Structure formats: C-alpha cells, structure tokens
Amino acid sequence: MSERESMEFDVVIVGAGPAGLAAAIRLRQLAEAAGRELSVCVLEKGSEVGAHILSGAVFDPRALNELIPDWQARGAPLHTPATEDAFLWLGRQRAFTLPLPPQMHNQGNYIISLGNLCRWLARQAEDLGVEVLPGFPAAEILFDDQGAVMGVATADMGRLADGSEGPQFEPGVELHARQTLFTEGCHGSLTKQLMARFALRDGVDPQTYGLGVKELWEVDPARHRPGTVRHTIGWPLDRGTYGGGFLYHLEDHQVAVGFIVGLDYRNPYLSPFEEMQRFKTHPAIREVLEGGRRIAYGARALVEGGWQSIPRLGFPGGLLAGDAAGFLDVPRIKGSHNAMKSGMTAAEAVFDLLADGAGQRGEATDYRQRLDQTWVMRELHAARNIRPGFRWGLWGGLAHAALETYVFKGRAPWTLHHHPDHAALRPAASSTPVDYPKPDGTLTFDRLSSVFLSNTHHEEGQPVHLRLRDPALPLSLNHARFAGPETRYCPAGVYEYVEENGAGPRLRINAQNCVHCKTCDIKDPGQNIDWVVPQGGDGPNYPAM
Amino acid sequence: MKVLVPVKRVVDYNVRVRARSDGSGVDLANLKMSMNPFDEIAMEAAVRLKEAGQVSEVVAVSIGTDACQDVLRTALAFGADRAVLVQTPEAALEPVVISRILKAIVDEEAPRLVLMGKQAIDDDCNQTAQMLAARLGWGQGTFACRLALADGEARVSREVDGGTRTVALPLPAVVSTDLRLNEPRYLKLPNIMKAKKKPLDIKPLESLGVNTSTGIRCLGVSEPPARKPGVRVESVEDLLHRLKHDAQVI
C-alpha cells in the first residue's frame, strides 16, 4: 500500500452541486465578513463542475437571491423566465389541461440548465477563495480516534481490474477537515455509509426515489416558444404507477424533455427509459420535437420522500445538505432552491461551531433547528402528504393532493408514511410484460445511442465500480424471481444477462456505460449492489443538463 | 536548458461534437474543453526530461482567449515551471498564424527545444510543428515515439509506416510527439493546488506584432452522413434481391 499524502482544510465539501457550492460560497462570505481565515475545499467526481449535474430544470431563484443578490449583474445563467405554464393529463392520443395547482405556478422562476448554473456558482466560489477540485471523487470517509468524521480520501487512480496497482498508479489523497459537509446529491455513496454508521435514518421514513430520464433537443425555430413549461401525468404510465413528463423551452431553440418514474413501481417489466421514449411519441410532445435533433441525454435518480424521510442531518465532524439528505419538493417538482438553502444553512451552522473554537470535529447540532425555521422546512412540511397519497393510484392521489392543498392547506393532522422502493417489486410470475415499441431512430432511440450522447467515459481496465455483495444473488433472486429488472431500470444498459457456451445466463455489468444515476443501488430487490465512485473524472460529461 | 511546450485547448476527447445547423462550424457551447491529448504527451515528455535533470526549465504556452488559462494551469500541474498565454480575440487561428506567434515567443524565450503535440484533435491539421521549424530554421523530429537528449542533440525515433526511423537533430530543434511516446501521468491533487500559485503571464497578441492574416476561409463544416438503419431480411433470396436491387452491390 502506497503512502497517501494528506492536506488540511477547515471545511471539506463533497460534491460540487447546488448545495455544496452554495455552502462553500456562504462559508467564505461569512469568513470575509468576520475577517477570519477559513479554508474551504469542494471535491467533485465529474471531470468538470456540471459534468454530472442533471435536472429539469425550472429554478426558483429564492435561495440564489439570498446568497448572491446581484447574480444578474454577475452574469448568472438564468436567461429564460418561465412565462407560460400548463399541467396536462395525457391519454393515449389526447391531452387535457388540468387546473394548475398553486405549487406548480412558476411566475418568477427560470428555465435553466442546472449544470451551467453550477459552473457559474463554482466560479463565484473560486473568486471567494474556495478550492474547487473537479476530477477528484471522495471515495472513503476518514474517522478520528473518537469515531468522528475527520475528512475524506479521494479515489486512487490507475488501479487495475483486479484491484492491484497499475504502472500509472497514483494513490488518493487524504483531505483532513475540522468539518466535512456531504452534498453528494441523491443517494450519495458516502452518505449511504454515514446513514448506516451513525444510524441517521432511525425513527424516520425510508427515503423514496424517482428516476428522471432527460434529453436536450434543438428544435425547429417555428416550434420553439421560450419560457413555456409543460408538465404531464397519465399516459404512458398505468394508473398504479407514479410519474410524469416535462417539457421546457429554453433559449437557443433548445427544449428539455424528460420523464420521471417513481421507483416504487411494482411491475418488474417496466422500463423508465422506454417510458420516456414512448412519452415523446404523444402528439402533444411529438409536435414540438419533430424536425429537431436530440443533442444530449442523461439520467439521474431524485429523492421523493420529502419531510418524513429527512434523516438526522448531523454527526460528529460533519453535516448532510442538499439531496444527500433529501430536500426536493415533489409537488413543486423542484429541489435546487432547497438544496442551496440547506447548504447555506449548514454553512452558517458550521461557521458558528468553528468560531467557538471547541468545534473541532464536534457536531453542529443546531443545524436542523435552524433549517426548521427556514422556508425550506415549512414548504416541505406542507407538502409532506402529497407524494405518499399516490399509493391510491393516479386519480386517488390527485384527489388527495387537492384535499391536502385546498382544504387542509398542508396542515392535515396526520402524516402518511413511505415504504422502501426496493421492496415494491412484484414477482415476474404475477406481472404482465410490457410491449414497448421499437425505436425509430429519429424521435425515439435505444439505450446505447442514448448513452453515446451522454459523453460517458470510464477509463478501461479499472475495477468495476458497481459492486455485488453476493455474486450469486442476481441469478437466484433478480433473474429467477423478477426477470432481471436491472436490465430495464438501468437507463444506460449497464446490466445484461448473457448466455455463453450453453452455460446458462450470467449477469454482465458494463460499468463503462454507467451515467451515475444510482438507480441500481436504490431499486435492486436484494439490495445487493453498492455503487462506489470510479476513477476521478469518469462518468458522463453532460454539456448543459 | 529550457524547453517550450505549446499546448492547445480543444474540446475534450470524450465529448461528441456536432456541426452548427448553418454549417458555419462546430457548436462548442457548454462542452467540456481540455488540453489536446498529444500536447499532454509533449508536456509529460518535457517534465520527465526535467525530472531526469536534463532540462532546467519547462515553459508552457497557449494561444487563445482567457479560457485557455485552464489548460495552462493543467500544464503547470503536470510540472511546468511557468506559463504564457498569448491572448487573442474569440476567433480560432490557423496553424500558419500559430506558427508565426510561436516563432515570436521562441525569439523571446530562447528555448533549446520546442516539444509539441503532432496535431490537435479538433482540426487534425498536423502543420504547426513543421511550419515553426521552418520559420526558425531548426531541425525537426516529427511523430516522435522515443526521445533522448545527449551531447547537444536530440535523438528522436519517428513513427513511420511499418516501423520507426531514428534521427539525431542538433539543438535547438522542434520535436512533435506521437501517441506512443509516453502515457501521461495522473495529475496529483496537491500539484493542482500548487499550480494555481505558479506564474502565468498574459501577453496580448498585439504586443507581439504578428501578422494574423492568411486569406484562408472556412467554407463549411458538415457531419458524416447518418448511417441508415439496418433491415432484417426474410430469406437468402430476399437478401440477394436486396443486395442486387436496393444496395446494387452485386
């Protein structure tokens, strides 16, 4: 084992998304205002900031207004105000406009690329003296003698498939910190370890998730109406499956189109990727895309659990913020504003803790309390029953959502609870296979040509970053009982069962295709897959997703 | 002994590019940019020579907008001692102009060796090293897959069809690097942080008094024709019929 170098920071932040960058900026703002030295470093596994960021996105600038009030003068990439909103129920061929629930009004919001916003936030952070280090995934949590988190270690580079050190081997670096913020986004690989080690989920509901599949299109200028926002429910999903589509008209004749499927779906034959492809063939969507060309593709899991799934947010030595904890507001179909605000609140709590001097790897125990006093938690509390209400199907869920919104106004005296997504699958024997149409190559596509447009790259010859706890389980459980659901829920074609030399099926993991969406780690029925970070800079290279 | 390493900022090799709808060029908006991989090889070779004690200073130079500072920081993280950015307006410059600018930089810096990628992966021109050597009146060793310095000369093994050809060049010389010269190192995080503090001089292009006119115009950029989807044939007869009448290859 080669010796690892180590570096010291006051605060290390894992993940350069909206939460991590907002936290870094806030920390440096506070330090400058107080005239204090405070070193802050942000690690990012993508090859550059934004490379792994994927969101719709209609963005509520509320947190940004608080963080950088003069963002407009500083050229933040918020170019397209959301001007026209519609909420559609889709039948197979028809579309009906539904009344727009108050949470879905988007006046004052912007249609953006969250990737580009993060690139801009990273520049603001660097101008404030933050070390932003893309291409360096945090691979390991470091603990001190007392068991407190004392930082992270970056991934080794140049290991061979068998785990041994190759000729170019470069060991990871230990980043030691007085406080470590984990802002890895939905279902982060280190956050998952923290949840287990510090029992952060004790007494709260399991987190629930959705998988979002998104494409960016350049459309016929005649069909482009910048500022237009469309959300859909209904077709192509059946009434028992939660999910819906979106279509946002950005600037430069670009349209973001995507589809989200709740990962509590039950039919193992369902394929979120193919639901997305099918969604685009609906007349209401097709009419916008036809004659255009697809320019980018990606997918990412998102948190849907809301208020009742928020774990304990702190532990000795650090805090969770953003969707690593889970602040997405499902009825508003937004989370970046909450992610940023939670990052800023975490920064404030950590700054005060460190100012006390006694804050060496202590816990900023007042973080949750501070957060409870912000609009983030008020918003999430009011919305808490809407997503779980969809256990009663589409119409039951909508009726319940209306009741919660218009009658109780978020103050119902009860809280509905969640079940873990991986336990939701029914056996294949009692499920109906879905017959998805073949891709046509112009409007609909297959997985591999899609992954091609995500610019995904993993250096060859490295250890597989999708680890099976029990190598026999894919066959004995996934294949035998659930007809191999990982071959369908993976939006990148990572998993396939192959038969070679008459030896019977075997699971093949094409890890080089992985777009880092984390769905397999979430939905695997046996919870047998651990998604760990690959070599630095690997994964998708999203342009402006 | 000083080595000059010119580095170009190009679209990253993992990124798929597309032509602008009007054919006026490649759409680079929001795409990840990186150091040209062949220049990384040149950078690695220069740093290895320095680590071996044969070179005392490695200077990286890039030509372009302010955005090129990022590839210069990468060069500094590799181990370059300092960097020079020749700052130009937006437009991409032709190799002939780049060679004029590099000549002006060589006149200022007086390196004994210019080590550069044999071509950039964006325009694939493979011209700059040759034109620079001609302007300087220096020897050139192109497509280098082995490089050694000894007795005031550079021994360069060149990749030629079916083998290698080894030449000895008196210094100063220009050497362009091919793929097999080395495998560039992974950048170390502490070196990336140190690179932020290394000197990076910015010279406006005007200050060099270089003529940038070429008379060359880009008439159009187009993508290769899309591959037609395959068809499933029903029988051997069907296959033969289609080969004969649809594809017209038999």
Image (cartoon, coloured by chain):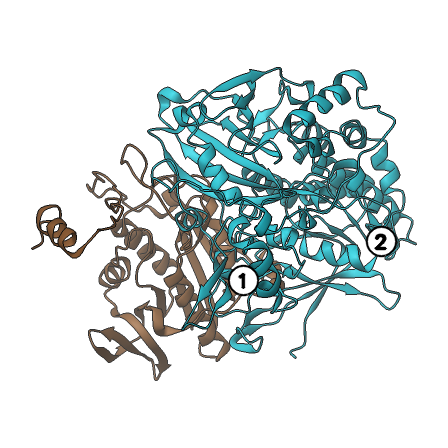
Q: Is residue B131 left or right of residue A297?
A: left
Check the image and name the residue furthest to the front: A430
Q: Please state which of residues A186 and A472 is positioned toward the viewer in this rendering.
A: A472
Badge 2 element: strand
Q: Quadrant of the N terminus of chain B?
A: bottom left
The chain assigned the colour brown in the figure is B
Q: Are marks 2 and 1 in contact (CB under 8 Å)?
A: no
The chain assigned the colour cyan in the figure is A
Badge 1 element: helix
- Residue A300 location (% of width, % of height): 58, 45
Amino acid type, callout 2: Phe
Is any part of residue A342 visible from this angle?
Answer: yes
Residue B77 badge? 1
Residue at point 55%, 66% (across, down): A464
Q: Chain of mark 2?
A: A
> Image quadrant of residue A384?
top right
Are dots 2 and 1 on a single chain? Answer: no
Q: Please state which of residues A419 and A254 is positioned toward the viewer in this rendering.
A: A419
Q: CA distance from mark 2 to mark 1?
A: 35 Å
In the image, residue A400 sits, relative to residue B150, either above or below, namely above
Q: Which residue is mark 2?
A: A315
Q: Is residue A68 left or right of residue A499?
A: right
Amino acid type, callout 1: Ala
Q: Please state which of residues B163 and A479 is positioned toward the viewer in this rendering.
A: A479
Dot 2 alpha-carbon crowd within 10 angstroms: few under 14, some 14 to 19, many 20 or more: many
- Residue A473 location (% of width, % of height): 62, 65
